[in-house]
Amino acid sequence: MQKFMRILKSEKGQSTIEILIAIAGVVVIAVAITEALTPPVETLHTHTVDGITRITGSGL
């Protein structure tokens, strides 16, 4: 945490605004990837659980 605070207070190199813009960009990309992958993963999970339930007769 001290290193992070030192970076925020630093006046050399990248400014705080530039760092925050980069972090915001990474967050937007992470959210977009999560949104894109959720439906296929959810479908895969549902099919896998249904297959296990059919074979074993229970979901456990």
Image (cartoon, rainbow, N blue to C red):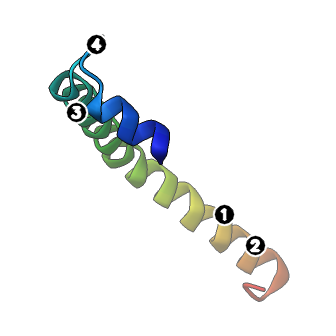
Q: Which residue is mark 3?
A: 20
Mark 3 near mark 4, Cβ–Cβ under 8 Å? Answer: no
Q: Which residue is mark 2?
A: 52
The kind of residue on which mark 4 rests is Lys
Q: CA distance from mark 3 to mark 2?
A: 45 Å
Q: Earlier in the sequence, mark 3 or mark 2?
A: 3
Mark 2 near mark 4, Cβ–Cβ under 8 Å? Answer: no
Q: Earlier in the sequence, mark 3 or mark 4?
A: 4
Camera-nearest label, 1 or 4: 4
Q: Position of residue 36 (x, y in %)?
A: 34, 42
Q: Which residue is mark 1?
A: 48
Q: Compared to 30, does 17 lie above or below?
A: above
Q: Secondary structure at mark 2?
A: helix
Number of other residues with Cα within 10 Å of mark 3, as a class: few under 14, some 14 to 19, many 20 or more: few
With 48 as the anchor, is 23 left or right in this view?
Answer: left
Q: CA distance from mark 2 to mark 4?
A: 57 Å
Q: CA distance from mark 1 to mark 2?
A: 6 Å
The image quarter containing residue 4 is top left
Residue drawn 23% across the image and 36% down it: 24
The kind of residue on which mark 3 rests is Leu
Number of other residues with Cα within 10 Å of mark 2, as a class: few under 14, some 14 to 19, many 20 or more: some
Q: Secondary structure at mark 3?
A: helix
Residue at the left extreme of this rendering: 17
Q: CA distance from mark 3 to mark 4?
A: 15 Å
